[in-house]
Image (cartoon, rainbow, N blue to C red):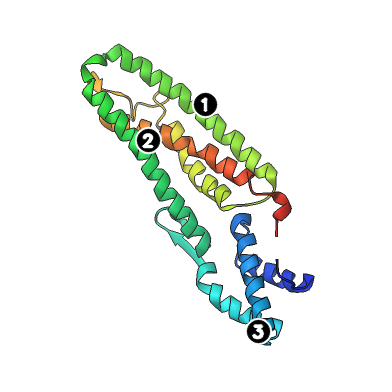
Amino acid sequence: MSGLTTDQLSDIKGYLDAKELFHLDLRNEIIDHISEGISAGMMHQQLSFEDAFTIEKQKWHDDLQSHSSYWLGLLWMGPKIVIQKCVKHTKILYLKAALPALAALLFFYSTENLWKEQILIILNSLVGIVYIGLFLLLLILKYKIKQTGYQTSFSFLYKINAISFSFLLVLYNPILSNIFSFIKEGSISYVALFIHAFTHAFSWFFVQFYKAHSQIQKIKMA
């Protein structure tokens, strides 16, 4: 990091606190950028710390202003730089989850004659059991993330997605509800098939969120 004093670094951190940027993976990076910009201004332009800091605030104003996105839900607010990173990840993950869901759809469609009603009833039960397991996994990972004691963009992604997916895992569970049963008038319900395949595929990204969050070293906390 730059040669700024402890008090000057505290001012930068206080500024980021005011902007609600508590996500370590981005917070530490921005602290480095701001402190380097201030040091450069003080060294090459003979600016005071306050003047150099004001210039840096102007540079980062747009990236740190409160923002939301349709992709994440308009109720979820945060610094623009955090929201944009999360939206980018979300778009990629939706695409990755949709591809295996489409593959499952095509597979079942091409082998439709093999799927008798009794087999679909068993499949309903298996999916329901997996949903219960995934629901418990979400609770465990949420607890483990909370125990780390810090926030990242990955824990933010986990939180906003886990809330909706927890409801889906209960609401769409074929054991608990017939809303999205695999069976429709004795044959395969392809709408339900796609939704279950997508939900299963996306659910495993929560493990990735947890791993990415855990890789952020707590000793780097700003």
Q: Secondary structure at mark 2?
A: helix
Q: Nearer the viewer, residue 14 or 28?
A: 28
Q: Where 47 sits versus 111, above or below?
A: below
- Where residue 142 sits, quadrant-wise, is top right
Mark nearest the camera among 3 and 1 is 3
How much space separates mark 1 and mark 2, taking CA atoms?
A: 16 Å
Q: Residues within 10 Å of mark 2 (few under 14, many from 20)?
A: many
- In the picture of the structure, the residue carrying the numbered disc 1 is 133
Q: Where 15 sits versus 93, above or below?
A: below
Q: Nearer the viewer, residue 176 or 55?
A: 55
Is 217 placed left or right of 83 in the picture?
right
- Where residue 197 sits, quadrant-wise, is top left
Mark nearest the camera among 3 and 2 is 3
From the top left corner, tell me how far across and down residue 123 is, in percent. 37, 19
Lower sequence index among marks 3 and 2: 3
How much space separates mark 3 and mark 2, taking CA atoms?
A: 54 Å
How much space separates mark 3 and mark 1, taking CA atoms?
A: 59 Å
- In the picture of the structure, the residue carrying the numbered disc 3 is 44
Report the disc number at residue 198. 2
Is there any visible trace of residue 221 in the rendered image? Answer: yes
Residue type, numbered disc 3: His
- Report how many numbered discs are placed on residues in the image: 3
